[in-house]
Amino acid sequence: ENKMKHKRIYLSLFFFFAVITGVNMLANDFAFKNLSTEPKHEAAAKKVFKKYADTNYDESLAVDVASAIEVSGMNKFGDILIAQIALESSCVHQKKGKLVGSKTGAKGLCQITPTTAFQKVRYELKDSDIALMKKLGANPPNWSRMEYSKSIFGKKFVPKRNRKLVIAWLEDPKNSIALWIVLMKGYETKYGIDGALVAYHDGEGGLKKVKSPSKHWYVKKTISIINKENI
């Protein structure tokens, strides 16, 4: 009788733990499926893009930015990166069919100048960077035959014919977003996130002149957007 009693207890415990294990597996599977179908920062990106872009809101841009943050492994800095795009372009890539631009010549959603795009893609990006860009749906161009020209004073510049090709490439938001995230990922690895923000805005040469990146106006403005929008 005692043996039968013990047997029933063991069977009850076995079935109990089997049920608990099954529930946990289903819960983990459900969580994984949710993670795979929607990038972690997609909701935040949509909220910020919708507010800043207003009538120029394009949901696909918010989705692509959130995806770039996740695929690049930059989830830790997702709030900062979303706020950065709001600061750069008010989350707008085109207005009335034309690429948005700045007084300094920066273009598109991520406000990248044609010179920077040419320099990075033509001379500096590594194979791993190109692979990441392709993974994000970008089309890394082959500019191997394109070179800088020099002014009579010896200053390098991208000639007009090549500049048009670079701007045409930046018109595709996937290219702009992919190059932005690759640059930010590389800068963050080298300088930390505050330094990365300054390097993106001022260039790596400009960063060297900054004693405390965390006190730079660009970093402070990015943080203020995070706090204001509760990203």
Image (cartoon, rainbow, N blue to C red):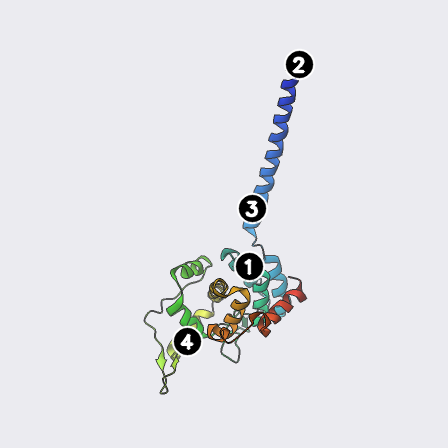
Crowdedness near tag 4: few (<14), some (14–19) or many (≥20) residues, C-alpha within 10 Å: few
Residue 43 vertical position relative to residue 18 in the rendered view, above or below: below
- The amino acid at mark 4 is Lys
Crowdedness near tag 1: few (<14), some (14–19) or many (≥20) residues, C-alpha within 10 Å: many
Front label number (3 vs 2): 2
Residue in the picture at 57% in, 68% down: 84
Residue 164, numbered circle = 4
Q: Which residue is mark 1?
A: 66
Q: Position of residue 166 (x, y in %)?
A: 42, 72
* Cα gap from disc 2 to disc 1, whole angstroms: 61 Å
Residue in the picture at 54% in, 49% down: 36
Who is closer to the viewer here, 104 or 38?
104
Q: Which residue is mark 2?
A: 2
Who is closer to the viewer here, 72 or 89?
72
* Residue at disc 1, secondary structure: helix
- The amino acid at mark 3 is Lys
Who is closer to the viewer here, 122 or 62?
122
- The amino acid at mark 1 is Ala
| Residues at discs 3 and 2 in contact (Cβ within 8 Å) | no
* Cα gap from disc 4 to disc 2, whole angstroms: 88 Å
Quarter of the image with the N terminus in it: top right
Residue in the picture at 51% in, 75% down: 202
Front label number (1 vs 4): 1
Front label number (4 vs 3): 3
Who is closer to the viewer here, 39 or 183?
183
